């Protein structure tokens, strides 16, 4: 009986030793399944600041606020983080500083020292596309959160579109220049204008208005009135250049000048275009005094011309990608069709219709599409920087600083906006984002 008892106790001891040898292995297995913080990204939005933690796996977390002084504490379970990674999040008007440390051996605690009280909210995002697991922490302004219910029921204020007037040069009894193969300038400009109208209208926040919709003659003054009646924020006049020497080639962009032409070529071209109609007369101001009229006219044109040169530069950069340029900078001359106060205007000589090769390109649907898309990109890039107040393109819900591993799809998803709107608001036509680049988060 005693022998049986001793054998039983030995067997228990053996099991106990086996358990002891397995425990470290189980502990290692638990640690190996822990996650790691790979990156931290911050964006500022209306009413809240968003922090996105890129993780390489799932992680349980908890978040709470402390007062006196104001702090938010984020605990992430069974997670590692490289020392100093929090230092890449720069202090701002809300977050005065960030501290982090290891807690309970395997957990990390991150403390945000704040300048005022907030309401913290957090959620996890599962992998999508190139983006992995993400933990999102939103620090909402308390004033913003208390009024969020009222805002959600109220109708959102509708922001207007930026309006671009597209003027197809010549028309009707005025055919413009004619190429060696019989191509008429008035035909080409209308074709490109129609393509440009479609491309611009595809862009969120922009609307195109055709000044000339068909083959009809329009006085230069009437073209300007049409743009003004449409409340245009920009006017683009499309043309196709001509020169006695058929070797002349390339695209050019012109803005108005009140002090003479920037070159003899620009002056000759302006004279030729202006000769198609009576020269532009005085603008109608609600002021009787002639001197006051002239002062207002000059002040208005000065700001308008500066904007026109800026717009022209953006379009020229894009035109270079689809066609050779005749002039590397925006030229200036006294074009009558560009003399519209308060409407930045440019005249684009898309190519030389007198050059056989460029005439062939101008007749090509594929080349017309390339030119149209290039102009659209230039227009969008200008307005993404300088859209008029009250337009969708002038508004944003905040700035976002691009991180090392960020992609457009991920940024759009993290900020609850569409990728299409994100591209339109920032004039992004490629996916080559750069770390540190600041982009605008569009309004809904």
Image: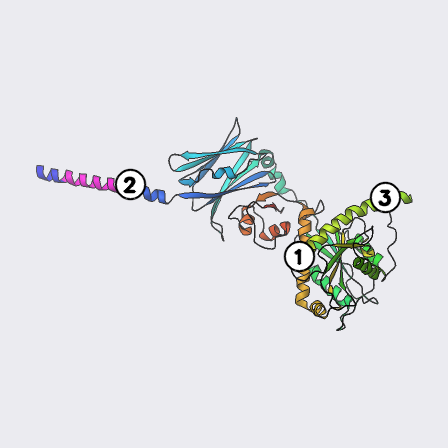
Which circle marks residue 63 in the picture? Answer: none
Label 2, label 1: how far apart the Cα atoms are: 63 Å
Which circle marks residue 318 in the picture? Answer: 1
From the image, tell me which residue sits under label 3. 295
From the image, tell me which residue sits under label 2. 24
**Residue at (81, 49) in percent of width and height:** 341
**Residue at (52, 33) in percent of width and height:** 97
Q: Nearer the viewer, residue 33 or 92?
A: 92
Q: Nearer the viewer, residue 155 or 75?
A: 75
Q: Secondary structure at mark 2?
A: helix
Label 2, label 3: how far apart the Cα atoms are: 87 Å
Magenta segment = 8-24
- Residue contact between numbered discs 2 and 3, judged by CB atoms under 8 Å: no
Q: Secondary structure at mark 3?
A: helix
Q: Relative to residue 288, is residue 120 drawn left or right?
A: left
Find residue 242 and report its image quarter: bottom right
Find residue 15 and report its image quarter: top left
């Amino acid at each position: 009986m005693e022998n049986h008892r001793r054998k039983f106790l030995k067997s228990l001891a053996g099991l106990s030793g086996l358990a002891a040898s397995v425990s470290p292995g189980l502990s290692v297995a638990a640690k190996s399944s822990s996650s790691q913080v790979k990156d931290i990204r911050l964006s500022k939005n209306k009413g809240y600041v968003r922090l996105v933690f890129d993780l390489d796996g799932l992680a349980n977390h908890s978040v709470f606020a402390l007062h006196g002084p104001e702090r938010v504490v984020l605990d992430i379970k069974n997670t590692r983080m490289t020392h100093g990674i929090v230092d890449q999040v720069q202090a701002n008007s809300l977050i005065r500083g960030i501290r982090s440390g290891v807690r309970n051996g395997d957990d990390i605690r991150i403390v945000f020292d704040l300048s005022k009280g907030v309401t913290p909210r957090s959620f996890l995002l599962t992998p999508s596309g190139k983006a992995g697991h993400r933990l999102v922490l939103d620090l909402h302004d308390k004033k913003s959160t208390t009024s969020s219910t009222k805002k959600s029921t109220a109708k959102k204020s509708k922001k207007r579109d930026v309006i671009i007037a597209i003027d197809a040069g010549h028309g009707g009894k005025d055919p413009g220049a004619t190429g060696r193969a019989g191509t008429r300038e008035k035909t080409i400009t209308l074709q490109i204008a129609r393509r440009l109208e479609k491309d611009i209208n595809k862009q969120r926040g922009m609307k195109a208005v055709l000044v000339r919709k068909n083959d009809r003659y329009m006085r230069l003054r009437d073209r300007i009135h049409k743009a003004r009646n449409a409340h245009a924020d920009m006017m683009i006049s499309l043309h196709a250049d001509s020169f006695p020497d058929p070797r002349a080639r390339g695209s050019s962009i012109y803005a108005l000048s009140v002090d003479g032409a920037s070159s003899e070529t620009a002056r000759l071209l302006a004279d030729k275009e202006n000769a198609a109609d009576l020269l532009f007369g005085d603008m109608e101001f609600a002021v009787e005094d002639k001197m006051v009229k002239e002062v207002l006219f000059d002040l208005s044109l000065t700001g308008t011309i500066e904007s026109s040169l800026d717009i022209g530069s953006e379009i020229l950069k894009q035109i270079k990608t689809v066609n050779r340029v005749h002039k590397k900078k925006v030229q200036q001359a006294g074009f009558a069709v560009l003399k519209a106060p308060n409407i930045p205007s440019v005249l684009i000589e898309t190519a030389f219709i007198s050059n056989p090769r460029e005439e062939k390109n101008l007749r090509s649907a594929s080349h017309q599409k390339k030119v149209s898309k290039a102009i659209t990109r230039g227009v969008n890039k200008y307005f993404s920087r300088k859209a008029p107040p009250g337009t969708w393109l002038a508004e944003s819900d905040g700035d976002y600083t691009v991180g090392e591993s960020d992609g457009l799809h991920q940024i759009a998803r993290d900020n609850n906006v569409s990728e299409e709107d994100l591209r339109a608001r920032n004039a992004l036509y490629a996916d080559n984002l750069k770390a540190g680049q600041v982009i605008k988060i569009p309004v809904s």
